[in-house]
Image (cartoon, rainbow, N blue to C red):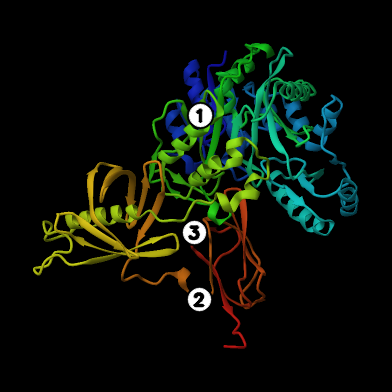
Amino acid sequence: MIQKILIANRGEIAQRIIRTCRKLGISTVAVYAEQDADSLPVVSADEAMVIPPGEVGNAYLNIPGLIHAAQATGADAIHPGYGFLSERAEFARACREAGLIWIGPHPDAIDWMGDKARSKARVQAFDVPTIPGYSGEDQTLPTLMNEAERIGFPLLLKASAGGGGKGMRIVRELADLAEALEAAKRESQAAFGDDRMLLERYFDSAQHIEFQVFGDQHGQIIHLNERACSIQRRYQKVIEEAPAPGMDEALRGEMGAAAVRVAQSVQYDQAGTVEFILTPSGQFYFLEMNTRLQVEHPVTEAITGLDLVEWQIRVAEGAPLPLNQSQIPLDGHAIECRLYAEDPQSEFLPDAGTMHLWQPADIEHVRYDTAMFSGVEIGTDYDPMLAKIIVHADHRDGAIRKMTHELGRLAAFGVVTNQAYLRSILEHPDMLKGEYDTQFLHRYHPDLLPNESVDPAACMIATLMDIDGESHTRPAFQGIPSGWTNMGPRTQRITWIIGEKEYEWRFGRNGAGDWWFEHAGHRWEHVSIRSIDTHSVSLNLDDRHTRYIYTQQGDRWWIQQWGGLKTELTFKDPFPLPKAEDSEGAYVAPMPGKVVSVMVEMGQEVSKGDPLVILSSMKMENTLYAHQSGKIAEVRVEETATVAAKEVLLVLAPHESPES
């Protein structure tokens, strides 16, 4: 029996594995890169050991370092989680060669399914339908162009060694193929060290359905029902649910049997996921198999009542699967939302910074898989997912209602998140009916963006709390109320910045002992704070009172109505110092990250639309383009440099127009 497990991962999945190990009485070892020294898994595990970056420059990819950590701490098994090395056969082999139990499938299965071209050919021999396409060894441009014409458009380019949306492009015309291939190959090479591509027919209207499969070392393989994963952006899932809406028993049986045949094709012996696309006509095609625990496994756990990490450990110890196919439950409905540090208003650019307040609501049958806590730093080195929120209910409508309720009460203050965007998705008519496909976010994105209306109560709360704090911290006259003069209280003004806009307010004392506020022609006569504690405040606003969650850092406030709108406000300094990003022609980093490429040099002439700098942050690239023609006056960064959000990268001196 396994006594101690080293978890070769970080963040929420490491924390989730620790939870099951505690239940089973198994000791845990967390490993960490230096920047994760204060992370929750490091604190939660029984032991923790720092891992150097190694030759690959990433601690979590340092195979010799991880093996050494397991041996040094006396671990007898390694759980890879997902991502990083979880689907690297060489890591599985290294663990076994070191005498460690690998909590994952045998290395040959990882090899077979890790290569999309080989896996496609292999499952075809087991009577599994696959998408029409090309997966040959000849990767020359003429061959790929000819194959693309044969397959037809639209076409999907996929990295043969890839996953997670890396090295993928949709091509709708032959004229666009060469450029898309170059970009996809470059991205695939950077992510996987392999630039081989697959060509597949792309279906504009299709569902992404996946089946959880499980095998043991005794030859038994079953599936644990399906998950619907069609709500995606950039080929990465955002919301998953189980069971899939509209799935009947006949189709579930047919697709589930095909998923089992896929696993049988490689004699699979652990947790895995077989992914399909399902066309409107009811035809399904094999996409790929993920040879690891999937990010969205909690929805399967919710509808089956099973602990899949516990199953993984038991199977790795040599035990048979505890249930057969006919015994797998399907109870109620579960939904998972992925909370990301990203801005849907800005093409999902990732954000970074300090999570000043992390406070989930306390609602029954709501599960958080996360490593978040108040004060944690969100960096740019890893995926921007902050948490997985999972709800379970007797039926789908109840699960949606519970999830929207939870999303309205979660306080995640300090970085920009997709929290409101997730609520918009769940409230969309097509989502409510369960009638959506992989194009849902592309089709409805503008309609799903949160309403930019400003909650006036947030401005009033911030103002009242600000002046109250100021009156208690001023060096003298602390007992004198704000705005007081010997001629009576005067009208005061304050300006709050919300997003890119400024909102000026007038306010003052009224005869009833509380406050009046005025903005944009609207006036509130009776405003006061009814009660307040560490992060909760209740506001009296004329004839009603409402509860809010809040936090403050310097001149920034985050205020969220209980179950409603979240507002981030910044006090406008009436005497500001000039900022570098305000200089004419300055191009600033839209997000914190690393400089991948500087494509211009001092004195170079550029035209409108020319690429200037490529940044990388949280596994995505962002290119800055010239807004107008001109000459490069300054270049302030070099390739591989790390930059902060709003940091000036270069300055462009624009050409004067003929009119000027």
**Residue 599 lies in what quarter of the image?**
bottom right
Task: Name the kind of residue labelled 2 in the image.
Answer: Glu
Question: Where is residue 336, by image quadrant?
Answer: top right
Q: Find residue 428 and name its label.
A: none
Residue that sits furthest to the bottom in the current view? 659
- In space, the residues marked 1 and 2 are separated at their CA atoms by 53 Å
Question: In screen coordinates, is 529 left or right of 577?
Answer: left
Q: In this view, does 60 lie above or below 621?
A: above
Q: Earlier in the sequence, mark 3 or mark 2?
A: 2
Read off the residue under disc 3.
Answer: 645
In the rendered image, the quadrant that contains the N terminus is top right
Secondary structure type for disc 3:
loop
Gap in angstroms between the C-alphas marked 3 and 2: 18 Å
Residue that appears at 10% across and 69% down: 487
The residue at 60%/34% (across/down) is: 240
| Residue 633 in view here | yes
> Considering the numbered disc 1 on the image, is that residue within a helix, a strand or a loop?
helix
Taking the spot 78% from the left edge, 47% from the top edge, the residue there is 157
Per the model, the C-alpha gap separating discs 3 and 1 is: 40 Å
Q: As shown in the figure, which amino acid type bears the numbered disc 3?
A: Ala
Q: Is residue 238 visible?
A: no
Name the one closer to the observer, 506 or 74: 506
Query: Which mark's residue is nearer the viewer, 1 or 2?
Result: 1
Q: Mark 1 points at which residue?
A: 398
- Residue at image mark 2: 584
Left or right: 185 in relation to 466: right
Counting residues from the N terminus, which is met first, the one under dot 3 or under dot 1? 1
Kindly give the residue lying farthest to the front in the view shown. Answer: 543
**Residue 393, position in %: x, y?**
51, 25
Q: How crowded is mark 3: few (under 14 residues within 10 Å), some or many (20 or more)?
A: some
